[in-house]
């Protein structure tokens, strides 16, 4: 099995498939294609991370380039450093996946995600190297250590608050036992908030395990029991945020986007009165933005696609339901800690509690999302599945919406059904999932 780029880098079981030889070839290919003499390498807390990041640094150094070790740092920190230091960036992380997977995210100089043509060139060269390069042990090198990888990035978050602080806010932050485990508490304390931290003791195998943005149940209970104002759930590499209101209600990426868009619009900071959303964004986002006279620009799933439209000057804000939000005035990629700081600031300025804000942000259309496991990420939507999609859409008519797609990050096909009636959405989603399962089997 050969790994390929998905919606956010390359990802797979480690070390079974994503191993030192693979990342060596990938780093060699990237350093040959992209115009960077200097590369910053960071990682999350997975058990496989140290060996993989060392292999990447060796490959870059053996190409005659400078490899700078950032250690365990969030993805947005690497993107920020890539931007301000005009360097290439590599993050060894499988984001929200469990510890058994790992991945590689690559940033071009300027801190941006790769363009389609760059991905294609890297992938072509990678496959050549995997085919022709013998299995050898790379000569280990002693990479340059970054003097202080997080200092300037922290200052950028402070600057984003425009001389305001988070004083008076009581936060609970779930670090998902990931790369923000040693950063989140001092950051939010420096911003003035009272902070309770959970899931900040990584052991190499507990990243995202029953915690973080994909499993916010523990955070929900902690927020309610502590009487906190707001809960912030990060994922393993801290590039996304799912928030929890004071009453336990979830504030997903859709609700956050609505809150930020209307706030920026009221302050006349929303360029072109537009936001970028994805095909997975709930229909309620479209309704809320229409009511606020804010245009929505729809793109395929993946923050890389959002960033393309932001960089084209169409908007300064975009996001995904999963919690990836990009504030283009402040960052080149999703940043869960930046989003958390700005959401807390918005709450404090609104004179409303987080439960009121969450409730008023949008009216969520019932949406059911089912993940059907498939043998590999290369699974395709068959003609049989497409026919059932069309029949289901005909039954829903104008009262619902369907999206069936292969995941770009996991070996699953995602089945999403929205309908005005929740039980109808559930039954139609299950029907489609059964058809997908039967077709794949």
Image: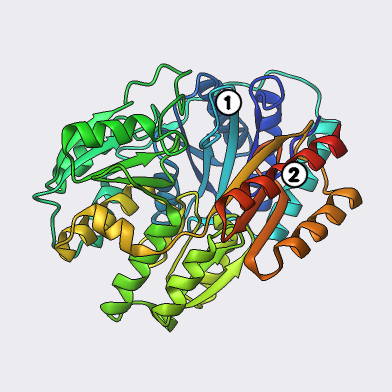
Callout 1: 10 Å neighbours few (<14), some, many (20+)? many
Q: Are dots 2 and 1 in contact, CB under 8 Å?
A: no
Identify residue for label 1: 52
The residue closer to the viewer here, 213 or 293, is 293
Mark 2 or mark 1, whichever is nearer to me: 2
Q: Is residue 48 above or below residue 257?
A: above
Residue drawn 46% across and 59% down? 364
The residue closer to the viewer here, 386 or 210, is 386
Callout 2: 10 Å neighbours few (<14), some, many (20+)? some
Q: Quadrant of residue 399?
A: bottom right
The residue closer to the viewer here, 129 or 371, is 371
Residue 229 locus on image (x, y percent): 19, 46
Q: Secondary structure at mark 1?
A: helix
Instruction: Count all numbered tags in the image, as a single digit.
Output: 2
Residue drawn 59% across and 29% down? 102
Residue 210 locus on image (x, y percent): 44, 25
Residue drawn 20% across and 31% down? 225
> Going by the picture, which residue comes out furthest to the left?
168
Side of 176 relative to 95 (left or right): left
Q: Is residue 275 above or below residue 358?
A: below
* Label placed on residue 424: none
How far, Cα to Cα, is label 2 from label 1? Answer: 41 Å
Q: Quadrant of residue 391?
A: bottom right
Residue drawn 71% across and 34% down? 25
Q: Secondary structure at mark 2?
A: helix
Residue 239 locus on image (x, y percent): 44, 46
Residue 55 shows in this picture: no
| Figure colour scheme | rainbow
- Badge 2 or badge 1: first in the primary sequence: 1
Identify residue for label 2: 431
């Amino acid at each position: 099995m050969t790994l390929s780029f998905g919606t956010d880098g390359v990802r797979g079981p480690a070390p079974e498939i994503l191993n030192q030889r693979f990342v060596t070839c990938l780093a060699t290919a990237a350093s040959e294609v992209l115009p960077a003499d200097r590369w910053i390498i960071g990682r999350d807390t997975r058990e496989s991370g140290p060996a993989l990041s060392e292999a990447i640094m060796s490959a870059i150094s053996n190409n005659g380039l400078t490899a700078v070790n950032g250690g365990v740092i969030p993805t947005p920190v690497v993107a920020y450093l890539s931007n301000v230091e005009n360097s290439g960036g590599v993050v060894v992380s499988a984001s929200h996946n469990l510890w058994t997977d790992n991945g590689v995210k690559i940033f071009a100089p300027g801190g941006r995600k790769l363009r389609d043509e760059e991905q294609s060139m890297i992938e072509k060269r990678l496959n050549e190297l995997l085919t022709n390069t013998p299995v050898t042990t790379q000569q280990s090198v002693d990479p340059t250590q970054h003097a202080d990888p997080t200092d300037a990035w922290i200052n950028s978050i402070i600057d984003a608050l425009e001389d305001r602080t988070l004083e008076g806010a009581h936060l609970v932050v779930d670090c998902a036992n990931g790369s923000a485990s040693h950063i989140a508490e001092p950051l939010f304390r420096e911003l003035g908030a009272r902070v309770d931290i959970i899931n900040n003791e990584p052991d190499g195998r507990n990243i995202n395990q029953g915690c973080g943005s994909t499993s916010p149940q523990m955070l929900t209970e902690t927020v309610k029991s502590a009487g906190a104002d707001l809960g912030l759930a990060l994922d393993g590499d801290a590039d996304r945020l799912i928030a929890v209101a004071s009453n336990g209600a979830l504030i997903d990426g859709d609700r956050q986007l609505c809150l930020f868009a209307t706030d920026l619009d009221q302050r006349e900071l929303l360029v072109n009165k537009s936001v970028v959303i994805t095909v997975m964004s709930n229909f309620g986002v479209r309704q809320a933005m229409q009511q606020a006279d804010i245009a929505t620009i729809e793109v395929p799933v993946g923050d890389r696609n959002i960033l393309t439209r932001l960089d084209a000057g169409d908007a300064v804000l975009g996001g995904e339901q999963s919690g990836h939000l990009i504030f283009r005035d402040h960052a080149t990629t999703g940043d869960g800690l930046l989003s958390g700081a700005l959401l807390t600031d918005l709450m404090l300025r609104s004179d409303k509690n987080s439960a009121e804000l969450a409730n008023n942000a949008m009216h969520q259309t019932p949406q059911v999302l089912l993940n059907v496991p498939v043998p590999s990420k290369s699974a395709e939507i068959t003609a049989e599945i497409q026919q059932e999609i069309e029949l289901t859409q005909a039954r829903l008519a104008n009262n619902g919406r369907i999206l069936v797609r292969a995941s770009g990050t996991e070996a699953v096909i995602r089945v999403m059904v929205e309908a005005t009636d929740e039980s109808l959405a559930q039954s139609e989603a299950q029907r489609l999932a059964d058809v997908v399962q039967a077709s794949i089997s």
